[in-house]
Image: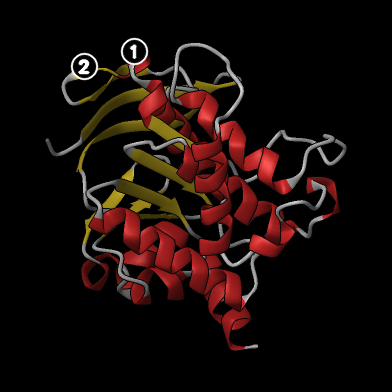
Amino acid sequence: MTTILAVDIRSVKLEDREVLCGINLSFSGGQLVGIVGPNGGGKTTLLHCLAGLTSFSGIATLDGKPLRYQRRRIALLQQNPELGLHVPLTALEVVLLGSLCRGRWIRRPGRGERRRALAILEQLGIGGLASHAFSSLSGGEQAMTLLGRCLLSGADVYLLDEPYSHVDARGERAMHRVLGDLVEAGKLVIVVDHHLQHLSAEGYGRILLIRNWLVADGPPQKVLRPDVLESAYGNELRTMALGARR
């Protein structure tokens, strides 16, 4: 059955400030969706609402059932994960944490899960780092490892907050392949990405432009037009364009 994630956000307030309002969205499996918008526009908050981590006035459902009962079907890659630099785990052990999302009880991962975790690291191009301490990895390698943890969870919905921030060109290519495989398998993948060139070139079928509300929603050729982007970014768009040319 096609995964349907639906959310109707009437209002989200953080520290008495309204961060999001009037957002009504639905998503199907087999979609790669990009979220873009100015800093402070509520992109990460929207992901957290979809993950069931942030309270809001409204409703969210997955396949017609309240989201709060189905969080195990959703994998979230946060921009600044709380997994500290001094956690005494290897890259393989971090990926294996994803297996904890699949059952109701905490148990040791089996041999099959270890083989799957190793295969995921190879798929991401960091198989040689399996036995390395997570704390010794670069920022990009840590991001890839944490994406591997999401993949092992076997989720139906993947929410990724700026996954390319610390990743080099080789890592970007590996991520693109993996995300494409997820979409082909019928998974829903939603990515916050501030690189506008990614959104126009990397297979996104749908773009959401957010500035505390939904400014635009549609295919890249409709949403990524300069006039539409400027309505959300204003002067910030010119600064971004100058930075991209340097």
Q: Residues within 10 Å of mark 2 (few under 14, many from 20)?
A: few
Residue underneath mark 1: 69
Q: Residue extending furthest left?
A: 1
Q: Nearer the viewer, residue 217 or 95?
A: 95
Of all residues, the one furthest to the front in this rendering is: 111
**The N terminus appears in which quarter of the rendering?**
top left
Quadrant assignment, res 225: bottom left
Question: What quarter of the picture does the C terminus occupy?
Answer: bottom right
Q: Residue 129: x percent and y percent?
A: 73, 59
Indicate the position of residue 94 as horizontal and vertical percent values. Answer: 67, 39
Mark 1 residue element: helix
Q: Secondary structure at mark 2?
A: strand
Q: Residue at x 44, y 71 (%)?
A: 198
The residue depicted at 45 percent of the width and 12 percent of the height is 104
Q: Position of residue 160 (x, y in %)?
A: 48, 47
**Amino acid residing under circle 1:** Tyr
Q: Is residue 119 visible?
A: yes
- Real-space Cα separation, disc 2 to disc 1, in angstroms: 8 Å
Q: Amino acid at mark 2?
A: Lys
Location of mark 2 (residue):
65
Front residue of 121/173: it is 121
Q: Look at 24% across and 53% down and name the residue there.
A: 31
* Res. 235 in view: no
Is 202 situated above or below 160? Answer: below
